Amino acid sequence: MIEFNAVTEATAPGKIILFGEHAVVYGRPAIAAPISQLRAKATITYSSSNNCYIVAPDLNRHDRLQDLPPDDALALAARQVLDAAHIAQPPDVTIYVSSQIPIASGMGSGAAIAAAIIRALAKHLRRADLQTNEMVSALTYEVEKIHHGTPSGIDNTVVAYEQPIWFVRQSPQNQIEPFTVATPLRFVVADTGVRSSTKVAVGDVRGQYEAQPAQFTEIFDACGRIAQTARAAIEAGDVVQVGQLMTENHAWLQQMTVSSPELDRLVAAALNAGALGAKLSGAGRGGNMIALVANDEMETAVRAALHQAGAKSILTTILT
């Protein structure tokens, strides 16, 4: 007889890409970090209805798991755990899902929601083997395929491990390395308010790469070199160089056509206000940008400039 916990919950953080977005899909290194103050949460309670329900008020969802199609992301997160646990009949529970992470903003909302469901359900089933960071990341990756088409694997890794990572997509196993942050890095994160599809942006870049392989190989190589230099700068505590590399990375992302007028306007506003560096973060075409600031005074100036330039929301996160 399988025993279940009565009420279980789990959370997962949002994320930002510091360096290497898009190029990471093609085997170049990337650096990403969690935003721990923005989280997705899954709470599992017993249901007397003899059914498994997924309830997500933020998404206006109240569905029976058995009725949902194979490509439903919330359902797939739950089914991944049940399949891994060899449970054919879903337990009689209600899975409540909520998230503070803006959707389609480049902050990993889809991965965080999936990871929260996976970890909570594994905990509910009392399956410690399915709660490990490695397993949560692997199961979340399968859900990410719905969101991204050909995901790099970086989002699921960051939200599962909740620490800054160096990531290289490679076969047979991705290279995943936590690394040392010598000096805390303070990032101001600003939302354009423009929602964009990661899957579409990744697909567009792939189409351009296939049409112009030499040009895009040069772009991806440049982004890879920037990420390598940035890791050394972060580990050495060279905050000024980290900022310069961010701005350089943004220029290459513009050449990939994944920036947008809104993102460029916020990046320019942050730099003009004294930020050490700024760039889009994530898939682009909307979503968020990040700016590196050195102190309270610089942060205040950058925040004011971003508000003036049309940012819909602003938060600060510190990478340590």
Image (cartoon, helix red, strand yellow):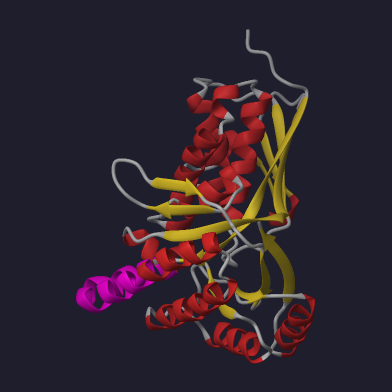
The image shows residue 283, relative to residue 274, as above or below, that is: above
Residue 188 place in picture, x, y as percent: 69, 73
Residue at image position (29%, 41%) is 172
Our reading of the magenta stretch's main secondary structure is helix
Please name whichever residue, 244 or 2, is drawn nearer the observer in this view of the structure. 244
Q: Is residue 301 left or right of residue 231?
A: right
Q: Where is residue 166? Give x, y as percent.
A: 46, 54
Q: Residue at x 70, y 64 (%)?
A: 317
What residue sits 22% from the left and 76% below the top?
211
Which region is colored magenta? Answer: 201-224
Tell me the quadrant of the picture where the N terminus can be found.
top right
Q: Quadrant of residue 297?
A: bottom right
Q: Please state the horizontal and vertical placement of residue 181, each as a whole percent of the image.
A: 59, 57
On screen, residue 194 above or below 135: below
Of residues 213 and 200, the one nearer the viewer is: 213
- Give the image location of residue 89, x and y in percent: 56, 21
| Viewer can see residue 204 | no
Q: Residue at x 68, y 89 (%)?
A: 273
- Location of the C terminus by quadrant is bottom right
Q: Nearer the viewer, residue 179 or 110?
A: 179
Is residue 242 magenta-colored? Answer: no
* Residue 220 covered by magenta stretch: yes
